[in-house]
Image (tube, rainbow, N blue to C red):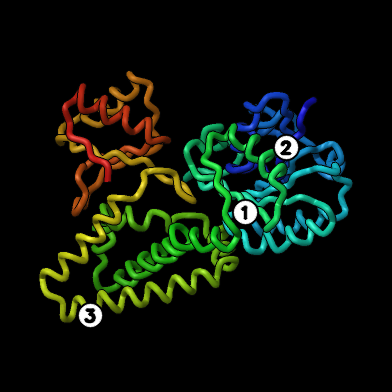
């Protein structure tokens, strides 16, 4: 019997899930998006098997509903679900970046006999929209599930069996655990990155050349500040309490650094950076909550045609790149050429190719 999956919201995340789940046997992927052009693109590019203009009209025939919409929109859809004619054993899930508000609403659905299991695939891209959807977007990334307490094992197992076709690492945590952990590793770093950029902006008047030097480490540290402001407005508001807790901890850490700068010995300061380096070097190389660029630094000599030479070697071995840039300010940066790839595997193949065929040194920061 065919399993019907309805994906509501066909942007990067919803579209990529739709593509990935097409690998599941006996499964039909039906898509809906409020934007008619997005629906047309999804149909033309075979991102879904079929599209609908009114998801409520087919709700009674759907086995699993996935919201690929922002949290605020998902909350509105969840409210609408209360009046929809649904299958008795339908499972509903979402892909939102925060879970507290979603799971509060899920409690209301449970009272009506509707099974809702929160979800968050922790991967993304520098691109957005249905045209950027990729079936492999979630491979090896964490896919967090946040069930309500006491959720039936059979429901969890059913959803996990479907999500295994994303090739993500599916794990279950509570909504509060999820929001705390994502605040630490994703949400709060975005706030810090934005604050550093604002601090740079304050230098424009007296030291305008500072912006020209803001490459290398500064550019890498603040890359995430270029993310969608509307998305991060919503995430900040939805996870405000956790962010305030992180900010309090950050203020204490800044106080410790101030004391270190004022009274610390050379040994104290070296130890501070050494411990930070050890902790940083132990971090796993994987896709995180948002887009992670798999960057390869290449120490190339400066002569005409060297960049086309490197990209030509990669093209010979069918290795795709997503971005290419030259670093001008090279403090703490190993290579003048930085190439970004879609996956860790592509980066490893590229490093081997360049070292073998061009004998240029490569580094991973």
Q: Which residue is mark 3?
A: 259
Instruction: Residue 284 in the image: state x and y as whole percent.
Output: 36, 46
Seen at 23% across and 61% down, the residue is 275
Report helix, strand or loop for mark 2.
strand
Q: In this picture, is 245 found above or below 24?
A: below
Q: How many marks?
A: 3
Viewed as shown, does residue 144 lie left or right of 188?
right
Residue in the foreground of this view, choosing between 97 and 210: 97
Residue 37: where, in percent of width, then height? 69, 39
**Rounded to the nearest whole Å, what is the CA distance between mark 3 and mark 2?**
56 Å
The answer to whether marks 1 and 3 mark residues whose Cβ atoms lie closer than 8 Å is no
Q: Quadrant of the N terminus?
A: top right
Specify the farthest residue to the top. Answer: 316
Q: For residue 156, what is the image quadrant?
A: top right
In front: label 2 or label 1? 1
Disc 2: which residue: 31
Write the residue at 24% across / 63% down.
209
Q: Which residue is mark 1?
A: 146
Q: Position of residue 330 (x, y in %)?
A: 19, 50
Real-space Cα separation, disc 2 to disc 1, in angstroms: 24 Å
Residue 249 placement: quadrant: bottom left
Which badge, 3 or 2, is on the more N-terminal residue?
2
Question: At 19% from the left edge and 76% from the top edge, which residue is drawn?
Answer: 261
- Sort mark 2 into few (<14), some (14-19) or many (20+) by Cα contacts within 10 Å: many
Comparing 55 with 271, the one in front is 271
Sequence-first tag of 1 and 3: 1
Secondary structure beneath label 3:
helix
């Amino acid at each position: 019997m065919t399993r019907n999956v309805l994906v509501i919201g066909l942007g990067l995340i919803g579209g990529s899930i739709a593509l990935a789940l097409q690998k599941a046997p006996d499964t039909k992927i039906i898509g809906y998006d409020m934007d008619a052009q997005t629906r047309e693109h999804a149909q033309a590019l075979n991102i879904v098997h079929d599209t609908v203009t009114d998801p409520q009209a087919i709700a009674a025939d759907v086995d699993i509903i996935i919201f690929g919409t922002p949290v605020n929109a998902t909350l509105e859809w969840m409210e609408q679900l209360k009046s929809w004619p649904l299958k008795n054993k339908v499972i509903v899930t979402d892909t939102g970046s925060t879970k507290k508000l979603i799971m509060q609403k899920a409690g209301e659905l449970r009272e009506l006999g509707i099974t809702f299991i929160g979800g968050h695939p922790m991967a993304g891209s520098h691109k957005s929209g249905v045209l950027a959807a990729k079936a492999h977007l979630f491979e090896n990334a964490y896919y967090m599930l946040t069930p309500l307490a006491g959720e039936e094992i059979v429901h969890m197992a059913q959803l996990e069996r479907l999500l295994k076709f994303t090739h993500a690492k599916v794990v279950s945590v509570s909504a509060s655990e999820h929001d705390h952990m994502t605040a630490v590793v994703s949400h709060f770093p975005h706030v810090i990155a934005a604050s550093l950029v604002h601090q740079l902006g304050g230098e424009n008047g007296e030291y305008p050349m500072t912006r020209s030097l803001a490459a290398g480490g500064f550019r890498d540290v603040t890359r995430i500040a270029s993310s969608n402001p509307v998305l991060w407005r919503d995430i900040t508001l939805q996870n405000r309490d956790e962010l305030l807790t992180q900010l309090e901890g950050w203020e204490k850490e800044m106080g410790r650094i101030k004391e270190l700068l004022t009274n610390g010995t050379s040994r104290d300061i070296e130890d501070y950076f050494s411990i930070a380096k050890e902790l940083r070097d132990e971090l796993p190389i994987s896709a995180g909550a948002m887009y992670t660029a798999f960057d390869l630094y290449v120490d190339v000599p400066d002569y005409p045609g060297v960049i086309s030479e490197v990209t030509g070697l990669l093209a010979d071995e069918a290795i795709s790149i997503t971005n290419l840039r030259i670093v001008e300010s090279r403090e703490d940066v190993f290579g003048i050429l930085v190439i970004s790839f879609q996956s860790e595997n592509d980066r490893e193949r590229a490093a081997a190719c360049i070292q073998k065929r061009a004998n240029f040194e490569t580094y991973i920061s």
